[in-house]
Structure formats: structure tokens, C-alpha cells
Amino acid sequence: MDRSDSSSDESDDRQNLIEQNGTERLPSPRTRSTTFDIDDDRHFRPPIHRFRFSIPKFAFHKRYYYLLAAALPLCIIAIFFSVDIRSLFSSLNISSTLGSSGSLSDRMRESELRALYLLRQQQLDFFDIWNHSNSTFNSTATNNLSSNSASGDAFIEDLKSAILKQISLNKEIQNVLLSPHRSVNLSEVVDDAQTMGTFTIDRCGKIDQKLSGKRTIEWKPKSDKFLFAICTSGQMSNHLICLQKHMFFAAILNRILVIPSHKVDYQFSRVIDIENINTCLGRKVVISFEEFSEIRKHIDRFICYFSKPDPCYVDDEHIKKLKNLGISMGKLESAWNEDAKKPTGKTVSDIESKFSSNDDVVAVGDIFFANVEKEWVNQPGGPIAHKCQTLIEPSRLIKLTAQRFIQTFLGKNYMAFHFRRHGFLKFCNAKQSSCFYPIPQAADCIIRVVERANVAVIYLSTDAAESEYGLLQSLLVLNGKSIPLVRRPPRNSAEKWDALLYRHGIEGDSQVEAMLDKTICAMSSTFIGASGSTFTEDILRLRQDWGSASVCDQYLCQGEEPNFISDQNDV
């Protein structure tokens, strides 16, 4: 893997917003009459045919009248409990209407409405099956599928998918039958919310992180031992991942981590809460460069994790910047022969044996591409024991601003989509499986996830040109309704959701806006990301650590190849 193997991206996002429509919920049809009101003329009376009949005269004894009077209420009660009176009157209403209006169009209309009613009953049964299967599978999966959990999980997902497909097909048929009657008030028969009043479908539930079996390491640094972090690869997302790995190294080596200066790196204090890291550990484990420079001015040992393509993955310009800060250092040394393009797996023991030192200040070169205890590092919350959800997260200002934006424009149930395009065409086509999809294909993939997640709006984080996301917006149509793409609008004094950034003088900062985008995406109910983008990977890390990760989270068109790929040869 080289620098181009992992794409990082931050972008400014602006677009006018589209309102979302709500849906009124009504009671379940099982609690209502099934009557179809075909004719609205309340003065209409069907013709009454008179029949001649006579009652034979019988001489009843007086006691028979008493018996009849006593038995009559019992008969009425028996009939009441054995006959569905509402259905009876519904049938009478339909029959009377048909008798009064025998035209072909009326009969067709009645047939369509009857079909709609039957489809509703079928849909209710589907919901019953769905809810019952969820509870059954959750309670019996461990016992019945322990011998073959992979195939068992696949079977369950296939069955759920089949049920959802039938529910969607059922709804599509209802829409077709309903289309000729849009001008008629048929809410009591066909309102889509009625079946959801009693039955709920959780298609995109949260992922169980299983934190009980988490493997962690204690970070208890010595007060006079420091690890000087060096991060040079890519943009902000890469540097945050590099910083997280440096924290793991510092915990292994029992050292305090020195956060890089903004004069040689990004201004991390603007986007992440550095002091919160110390709070989560309950001790001093990280310090700023400014605080470190008051204690030390010299790097005793500079160890390179990667020896190729450049030692420590730093160039002369970076070394010059460090020296301009008044930091002196010795010669760069490589811990081993390791190529950043082909990193090999390493263990905690390997790090201890190659990077342990009695020196007070040890600098470690860029480790963004390092492959050290990958499964351990990628656990929810990271590999270090702490009392918070995650150690590296957006600053409090950014989190509050994201929450205010969500409350203003999105609401609780929204999907987020990171649509990476700038510089992505060549990057993706160089891979074995390209990750750059034509916009119509991307739209189809998004619609499938939207239908499953049942969201009304999509938050769009993108560096794409307006011509691209404009076309995407025009293609996002589900059941005849457009799915709005919402982007952060330009600064407007009438809007107060971003007032905190403005008040603290950090509005317009590209790194702050990028982290704000990440935060909004990480808080969404469902997320679609860009495969190969470290911006997406950092969002997925936050979603995992915050517990917001959904079973519907995925890369765009995951498992699909682009339906068209251009030639790779440059002219």
C-alpha cells in the first residue's frame, strides 16, 4: 500500500435544502370497519319490492308466548357473537351499491377497492411474520445455529430479505391499484400509516458491539518519558488515524504522547478534544507540543517504523520545520526493514522489543500504514482501557453544532452519504475492483438502502461538482416521491445552528467543517460511505465507538462492479 492506496478527503459542503413531508398515522385496520363507501349520495335509495304474504293463524297457549319472549334475547346474543356484524353491514353496503349502479366502471372500482383491502390484510400478516421471526431468531439463534453460525446467519438474513421484498411488492401493487382513486377520500381504506400504528419494523437496527469480550491495555505512562508523534501521510483523516496508532504505541511503551505542533501538522486542538483524552483515562497521558517545549527541547532518539520508500516516511522539509521549532534531534534510525507499500503484521511484543528505550524522549515516524494488532486496534472504543465511548472524537463545539444542524434540518431518522468524487476516478480504477460508480447506478444503490432504512431525507457530504450531485438528486425518486439531498448551507445570520462556531471564530475553517461533516454523518441512523476513503473510515470508527453503527451501513454499491469502467491508459 502506498499513499495513493488510501484516499483522504475533506470538503466544504453547501446547498439549498429541501423540506421533508410528514405522514399522519392512523389506527390499524384491524380495529376499524371494513366498509367501502362506494356511493356518496346519502339520499339514494335502492328500489323496494313488495311481496304479498300471509301469516297463518295459530292458537298459542299463553305459556308459549312467555317461552318465546325468554328465548328471543338469547337468540339475539348468540347471533351477535357468531356473526361479524360490521362485515355484514359492509357487505350489504357494497351489495346495495352494486345493485344501484351496475355499470362496468363501478364494478371495476369495487373490485379494485376489494383487492386493496385484501392486500392490506396480507400486509398485516407479513408484519406478523416479520415481528415473530425477529423475536424467534433472537431467542433461538444461539442454540440452533451454534454449530454453523455463518450459514445460519446467512439463512436468517435471506429469509428477512425475502419477507421485506414481499412487503415492498405488496405496497407496490397497492399503489398501482390506488392510482386511479387519488382524487377520492379513501384514507379509511388505504392510508399507509395504519398498518404501522400497531406493527413496527426495525430493518436497520443497531449493531451489537459485544463490549463484554473487549481486549484492552492499560495506559499508565511514566511522568518523565515521552513519545513524540510524527504524522505526515495524507490529509486530516489520515493524521487522526496515525495519531490513534501513536496512542497505542505510547500505551505499550508507558510514555506520555506529545501532540504535534500546528506549525508542522494540523491544528488538532480545533477539531478534537485533547484534554478529554486525559479525562477519559483519569491521568495525564497526552500533552500539547507547547507544554512539552517548556520541559524538553531535544529528541533523544528518532526511530523509523518504515524504512521504505523513505526512512520514517518524512522528508527534509518536515525535519526542517521541526528544527525551526527549536527541537534538536539525532540521526534517524530504522527499527527494521519495513516497506510502507507492503506492511507486515506486527505484535505488541515486536513493538516492545524494537521501540523500548531508556531515553526520555523518543520520536516515532509516521505509522499510518502500520499493521500492529489490527483486530485489537479496530475494536469499538479502541485498544486502550478508558471510561469514555472513544478517545479521539470531535470537540464539544463541533458536536453541539452538529446536533443543532440535525435538529434544524434533518430530524432523528436520516441517512448520511459520503460521496467522494474529486480525484477518485483514477484512484478507484487503479484498484482491482473499481469503486467509482456512474451516477445512475449510484442512485439505484442509494434508493435500495433508503427503502430498507425507511428514511425521508439524506445528508450529503461530498466534494462532487454541482453537475454531479444535481443529477444524483434528480434520480433519487422512490414511490413517486423525490428523496431530498441536504447539504450544509452557506453562513446565514438568520440561522442560529452554527452560532457557536461563529462566536468562537472557527467558522470557515476547512478542517472544522470537515469534522462537522464527519460528526453529522456519524450521528445518522444509516450511513453509506466511499470505499477506499479514510474520511469514510473515520466516520465508521466514530459510529462504531458511539454505538450508532447500523446493520444497513455499507459502502456505495457494496458488492457491485461499476457497470462501465473507462480505459486506464493515459494519453
Image (cartoon, rainbow, N blue to C red):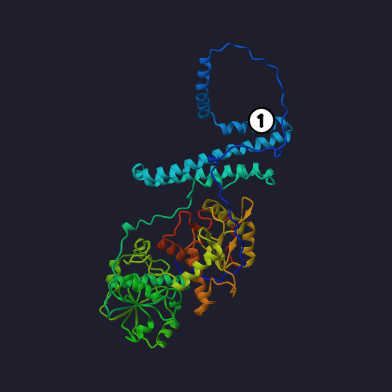
Choose between 256 and 88: the one closer to the eye. 88
Inspect the image, locate mark 1, and give the three-letter code of the amino acid beneath it.
Answer: Ser
* Residue at x-position 34% and y-position 72%: 279
Q: Position of residue 458 (x, y in %)?
A: 56, 60
Q: Is residue 491 above or below residue 135?
A: below
Answer with left or right where residue 96 lies relative to residue 194: right
Answer with left or right where residue 507 lies relative to residue 325: right
Choose between 554 and 90: the one closer to the eye. 90
Q: Is residue 125 above or below residue 92?
A: below
Q: Position of residue 78 (x, y in %)?
A: 50, 26
Choose between 490 and 339: the one closer to the eye. 490
Q: Is residue 202 visible?
A: yes
- Of all residues, the one furthest to the left in this rendering is 358
Q: Position of residue 92 (x, y in %)?
A: 63, 31
* Residue at x-position 40% and y-position 84%: 322
Q: Position of residue 553 (x, y in %)?
A: 48, 57
Residue 425 appears in which quarter of the rendering? bottom right
Q: Is residue 5 visible?
A: no
Choose between 373 and 209: the one closer to the eye. 209
- Neighbour class for label 1 at 10 Å: few (<14), some, many (≥20)? few
* Residue at x-position 69% and y-position 35%: 108
Instruction: Label 1, secondary structure: give it.
Output: helix
Residue pointed to by mark 1: 95
Q: How many marks?
A: 1
- Of all residues, the one furthest to the front in this rendering is 62
Q: Is residue 98 above or below residue 168?
A: above
Q: Quadrant of the C terminus?
A: bottom right
Q: Quadrant of the N terminus?
A: bottom left
Residue 461 appears in which quarter of the rendering? bottom right
